[in-house]
Amino acid sequence: MRILIASDHAGFELKALLAGHAREAGHDVLDLGTATPESVDYPDFAHLLARRLTAGGGDFGVLICGTGIGMSITANRHPAVRAALCHDAFTAEFARRHNDANIICMGGRTTGPGVAIQMLDIFLATPFEGGRHQRRVDKVELKPGPGVRGPGSGDDTARSAVPPNEDKERES
Ligand code: RB5
């Protein structure tokens, strides 16, 4: 797989570790920086990676800052990015299974190296389940424009007009 990875200074060490691990696992890894531990601004790297990924430059992205929060907020401004801030094996697995996440975000100051490697391996190996989760993922993208009503349009008054999912009792 082609993996894009980027971090700010707070994720610099963890980025090097994960890039090396992914290469050893046989992935084609493109490190988009930062290239030194000097202080930089996380949005610059989140935007850079998100643009490359959504232009078809990779299969998945990995973004690391101090907490992973800034990277995830920024990357998710890009349509077609589903960046998931993960903290453990469970969140990494379900970010793929249920959310079809294409970027995993981590905190270099919150997540240890062992858990980070485990999360990356799980994230890259886990398929999206599709089905009802595809329906939900389809509802995530904003569809602005005249005449558009309902959740995601910015018109919350229409929310009650959307029928509940018939099988919602059974689903998770
Ligand atoms: C940098 O100090 C820190 O704010 C940044 O890495 C990140 O955690 C922001 O969300």
Image (cartoon, rainbow, N blue to C red):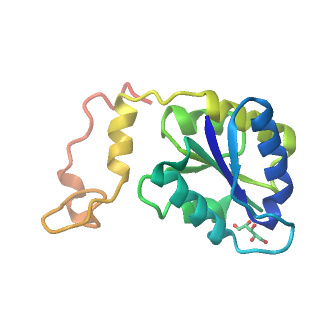
Q: Position of residue 86 (x, y in %)?
A: 66, 46
Q: Quadrant of residue 118?
A: top right
Q: Position of residue 172 (x, y in %)?
A: 45, 30
In which quadrant of this rendering is ligand 1 seen? bottom right
Which is more toward the observer, 152 or 10? 10
Image check: 149 left or right of 24?
left
Residue positioned 80% across, 32% down in the render: 24
Residue 81 in sight here: no
Residue positioned 76% across, 64% down in the render: 34
Residue positioned 51% across, 60% down in the render: 51
Q: Position of residue 25 (x, y in %)?
A: 76, 29
Image check: 29 left or right of 159?
right
- The image quadrant where one finds the N terminus is top right
Which is more toward the observer, 108 or 159? 108
Image check: 153 left or right of 26?
left
Q: Position of residue 120 (x, y in %)?
A: 71, 38
